[in-house]
Image: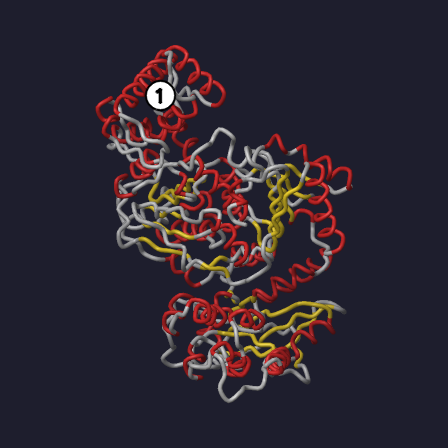
Amino acid sequence: MTRVAISDDFLEAYAEIPRFLQKKVRNFVTKFKQDPTSHSIKYESIHDMRDERVRTVRIDKAYRAIVLHPSKGDVYTLLWVDNHDEAMAWARHKEFSINPRTGAMQVLDTEAITQVTAEIQREQTAEPETKPLQEYALFETFADDELLRTGVPQILLPAVRALKTADALEKLEPHLPAEAYEALFWIANLGHSVDQAINEVTTAKLEAEVVDTEDIETALQHPDSQRRFKIIETEDELEAMLDAPLEKWRVFLHPSQADLVEKEFNGPARVLGGAGTGKTVVAMHRARYLAREVFTQPSDRILFFTFTSTLAHNVQQNLRNLCGAEVARIEVVHLHKWAVGYLRQQRIRVDVLAGQALQDLWRQTLTAVGGAEFEAAFYQAEWENVVKANRITERGDYLRVPRRGQGSRLSRLQRTAVWDVFKKFRQSLTDMGKIEWNDVPALARQQLEQQSHNPLPYRAIIVDEVQDLFPEELRLVRAIVPEGPNDIFMVGDAHQRIHSTVPVVMSRCGLEIRGRARKLKINYRTTEMIRRWSLGVLEGITIDDLDGQTDEHRLYTSLRKGVAPTVKNFASLAEERQFVIEQIERLVVMENVKPQFICIVMRESRMNKNYTRGLEQAGIPYLSLRRDTPDDASEGVRLATMHRVKGLEFTHIFIVGANAGVLPSKYIVAEDEEALRERCLLHVAATRARDTLTITSYGQPSPFITSLA
């Protein structure tokens, strides 16, 4: 059967074509997908092409598509689209070959490889008879055969052999197949063996047993090929690709991600990964896979939980673009909204006390009790992180429970006095007929257990940002879906815990993940320099793995080095604002960065006006992202709080107003759980940046920043 594949290069080229011409390309691609052997498609050989299988196809008088016409088999591959001369120039020195060792389809620019090889070799200095260790070539101790096993093409061996440092390897990155670059990166930077490095970057065998270098269809099934090529199954799938050609995450997955998406788990599974490792992408693809391939009955439902309404909106929009008809059976909602909806369906009254009203009740309680030793913020944190987290209802249990991470120690007498405050607060809530938000999941779970004879339609649950869930919320997750294969799939990173301050142990919440815990290790968003700075904010702090153990970020890494973050302190707000605006003007005017790729991030929403004034005066458009503001495609520099920016990413991030008394709040005086949450918040904000990160303050800078100097 004749089939059509599309490359990531084609989608990138299509995105650059003027919009009025994209319609012609779409019409051509649709017809091509239906029958690439049609007589109406006129393939033209090109006279001086490196790869003789390359053909051009006329789209109109000016535009040409570049196609790989198979010499064997029935798969035709769309490679590029452009003006005639530019299309010819792009294709002239390209070689589309199947690696004889790995079996993956690879794209090589032979002219560029020749040039970069010569350049690297020229940089080699004459080798003295006895040379210091740093003068040895980076991969000098590896045999050619070992390097070829990583996927390095034969033509690139001289360039790889000439490299002296791990930093120099980055120069070759644009010319190496992704799997080869990543394997060499692990070897050069982390001392992996070849086998270890290959296992980190691919799910295929270390070496294909027999490789037919003419069998394109088989090669395109290889996990490494699927990073850059996709065989088109349906016309709807093709339309979705062309609707969002730059959103490659919809189409091309890293093998480690693809393996998790389709893996059979015999129970709850947990995936950890640092910022930028694609956890949410994996979660969304997992939801689609389960709905399409595993739980396929019309009545089957997949429930996708997030912690906030903003993240739920983002995931819902992305799933609509990613999925076909199966999206109707995937319900995306933030956990508390679902719990409230379920309780109301059961005709259970839900009247939540929150926000300022809740703060007022704590103050009223302290006044009523009299002689309270601590401020209201202490009691509220102790109530949430110790009493509610451990489901304590009796004073005796509170006197015995550990208070890890809660700052100063309390004597037995102090605990007794604190419990009297809690008792009064609880009675006040009851008298008002109110509950707190963190009571809602427990009520929903209790109701589900009473209604066990009437199961819900959900067959599987996906949980994003699982690190922000409290134990009671995790117990609710367990209660919603029946136990069985592929029942619960959770992704998260405790380094990004910005809502819950309570470390959880999943096994104590009914979620046994032993043997089903996985990690994503490659950061695709943030440069290594930004990653190191953001992790430095958490230096010396033990972070849990969401199941009672310590999470180790040593093997979590970025593949781009980048530049070090810029950290500046100013005497006044006016000076800080002037610097930030000047830097944004430089990016927009001098470097042609689109304003919507820049974000100004601040700790509190009240700080917004400090910077919008400067943008207005400079004539720079902007969009303030509030809780319910969608981050649409409109132009304008974004402004957002550290909480609001979670789940988003930008090419350039400016963290502003990072002052003492703001980050952390002046009310946080000890390195307790509240301070850790503030550190995690800064970590999250910093890791939204792809290329550059700038942190500014005025007056006295945040101690979180000065500690990194």
Is 31 situated left or right of 237 in this image?
Answer: right
Residue 21's place in the image compared with 58, above or below, is above
Instruction: Say above or below: 292 vs 603.
Output: below
Closer to us: 167 or 193: 167
How many labels sit on residues?
1
Residue 662, relative to residue 507: is it above or below?
A: above
| Image quadrant in which you'd find residue 453 | top left
Can residue 566 be seen in this snapshot? yes
Quarter of the image holding residue 496?
top left
Say which residue appears at 25% left-offset and 31% top-offset: 401
Quarter holding residue 641:
top right
The residue nearer to you, when weighing 401 against 143, is 401
Location of residue 632 in the rendering, given as x and y in whole percent from the top left corner: 62, 43
Query: Where's residue 197, x and y in %?
Result: 40, 69
Left or right relative to 653: residue 460: left
Q: What is the basis of the colouring in this image?
A: secondary structure
Q: Is residue 693 left or right of residue 507?
A: right
How many C-alpha atoms fall within 10 Å of the one at disc 1: few (<14), some, or many (≥20)? some
Q: In the picture provided, is 490 more to the left or to the right than 703?
A: left
What x and y, as percent, mark residue 692? Answer: 61, 53
Secondary element at image label 1: loop
In percent of width and height, residue 289 lies at: 41, 53
Q: Which residue is mark 1?
A: 348
Q: Nearer the viewer, residue 368 or 412?
A: 412
Above or below: residue 352 compared with residue 179:
above
Q: Is residue 27 visible?
A: no
Name which residue lies at 37% across and 70% down. Answer: 196
Amino acid found under the numbered disc labelled 1:
Ile
